[in-house]
Image (spheres, rainbow, N blue to C red):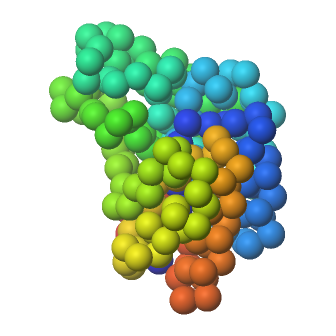
Amino acid sequence: KAAITFDDGPNKDYTAELLKGLKERGVCATFFLLGAEAEKYPDLVKQIHEDGHLIGTHSYQHVNLCNLTDEAAIEQVEKTNELLEEITGECPEFIRPPFGCWKANLDYETDMIEVLWDIDPLDWKTSNTSAVVKRVLDKVNDGDIILMHDASKSSVEAALQIIDSMKKDGYVFVTVEELVLD
């Protein structure tokens, strides 16, 4: 089993393409969405939800929560949660803080489950699809959470190639909920 996750969306140019590829492959993924992007593209959020993917909170504006006051960090999370619940009818249970930085004392403010990652191929730093695919396939193990983004053509292509290759190797893709709570 492995979970493939996508941060920073939804993206007006690439999320729909990714969703089409995931549907064709029968794969459910986890999307950690930015509130500001969800607000701009609620139809994409609805499609992610309707296609059976898990939606988690990233933050509202992709800021490092550790650099904010507690109140500002809580606002980033709550504003996004409220928006996503308004669009999907479900309040997110999972959060991936931007930069992987979670304020420990916020555990007392929210009962959300923090989800980080096992493999980060730095897909946002390059347009080299093959390099991203290799970075994942060289490291992936059973139970891993793969961090990707849906903000470029090369990232979407890499994600779909990774899925195809891993499925050939016998991997089943699950949402982070199935990995974290299993």
Q: Is residue 22 left or right of residue 178?
A: right
Tell me: residue 12, above or below residue 126. Answer: above
For the view shown, which residue lies furthest in the bottom direction? 169
Image quarter for residue 91?
top right
Q: Residue 67 at x, y = what percent?
A: 26, 18
Q: Is residue 142 left or right of residue 170?
A: left
Seen from the viewer's position, the closer of residues 70 and 88 is 70
Please report the residue visible at 77 percent of the width from the left and 63 percent of the height from the top: 21
Image quarter for residue 169?
bottom right
Q: Residue 145 at x, y = what percent?
A: 42, 62
Tell me: residue 149, above or below residue 142. Answer: above
Image quarter for residue 27?
bottom right
| Residue 108 seen from this side | no
Please report the residue visible at 51 percent of the width from the left and 22 percent of the height from the top: 60
Q: Residue 173 at x, y = what percent?
A: 56, 72
Seen from the viewer's position, the closer of residues 176 and 167 is 167
Seen from the viewer's position, the closer of residues 171 and 57 is 171
Q: Residue 52 at x, y = what percent?
A: 69, 56
| Residue 153 seen from this side | yes
Please report the residue visible at 65 percent of the width from the left and 26 percent of the height from the top: 37
Q: In this view, does 174 lie to the left or right of 71?
A: right
